[in-house]
Image: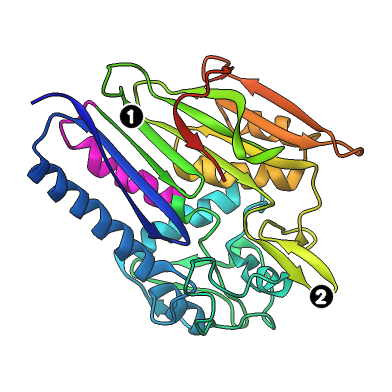
Amino acid sequence: MRLRELSQTKLALGSDIKIAIISDMSQTDAEHLFGVLWKKVYSFEKQFSRFLGKSELSIFNRSAGTKTKISPEFRELLINVRRQGVETGGLYNPFITPALQRAGYLKSAMLGYEQDAQSDYTDRKVVGVERLVIGDDWATIPYGTAIDIGGCGKGYLADQLGQILNEQSLTGYWMSLGGDVVTMGNDENDNNMTLNIQNADDLGGVSDWIVHCPIKYSSTATSGTFRRKGQNIPKSWHHIINPNTLEPAITDIRLATICAGTALQADVLASCAVILGSKKAPEFLKKHGVKSALLQCIDKDGVLFEQVFGDMISIKKDTNNKGVLADA
């Protein structure tokens, strides 16, 4: 059969999830593979969403202060969460949930679920990531705290989906999970895959920068302060909380696009870059081994300026604007 791109898009995790495979497999085999992938996506959401009262994460938060038995999947996720918190010096902190809710992010961002009842953690405290204790089949957090894996969950899931697809005989694939994009291999024309980067000055358009993805596994994440935001009288808010101030980050970075070794790393580091701002972010990202980064920033006069560094083979100027969109 002829090589072609087969893709599906569904709503999950508060955003559109897009999965595409490049293959000559039959439609029947492709549908079976997509079924496996979507089952993984919705199982992950059911198990780890803080917006679902019966999720394992919600039950764990309600059990704060006690040693709680957890599933092997939750244990693996928590180990990754704690590692990211330690490696970023606490700039990524899963305990930020109460501050996030106090800022205004109390409801699900998924269309149709905004009025669902949510657990209220606004009176709980924020502690350091070292207070997350993980045993062989149990974990515990201090009484009066709550965690959320939203800052790295989609990246973690993207890497998990990539592992499933890596076991298939595919020419290539790409996935977009709400700002986290992973690719592998070539497109249906046997060319390297490319990613457009959203334009911070025109959120409906694309910038002149494009990511040229290597054939091996590639991960790119974009984070910004405009997607999950709102008005919490008397001030506005966005969803990226500075753990040092426990308030929405005051930053000149409007969009940060990061290429890293895994989608989990890219997801976390993109948000860290936004928190740090344009002066501190480059050194921090280089220290953490970021391959390429594009920071779209706003100066004191409201004028957009850009910072790009790293492996320039990955991120280049390209006005043809062809490829998958890497947006936040």
Image location of residue 102, percent across then percent down: 72, 74
In primary-sequence order, the first of circles 2 and 1 is: 1
Image location of residue 141, percent across then percent down: 54, 74
Residue range (magenta): 155-171
Image location of residue 82, percent across then percent down: 52, 56
C-alpha distance separating marks 2 and 1? 45 Å
Image location of residue 84, percent across then percent down: 54, 49
Q: Nearer the viewer, residue 78 or 119?
A: 119
Q: In the drawing, does residue 269 fall left or right of residue 188? A: right
Find out whether residue 169 is within the magenta segment.
yes
Label 1 Cα crowd, 10 Å radius (few <14 / some 14-19 / many 20+):
many
Q: In the drawing, does residue 219 fall left or right of residue 120? A: left
Quarter of the figure with residue 193? top left
Find out whether residue 10 is within the magenta segment.
no
Q: Residue at x 37, y 46 (%)?
A: 18
Residue 233's disc is 2
Residue type at tag 1:
Met
Task: Assign a secondary structure to mark 1.
Answer: strand
- Secondary structure that dominates the magenta span: helix
Q: In the drawing, does residue 325 fall left or right of residue 186? A: right
Which residue corresponds to mark 1? 184
Q: Residue at x 71, y 65 (%)?
A: 230
Residue type at tag 2:
Ile
Nearer to us of marks 2 and 1 is 2
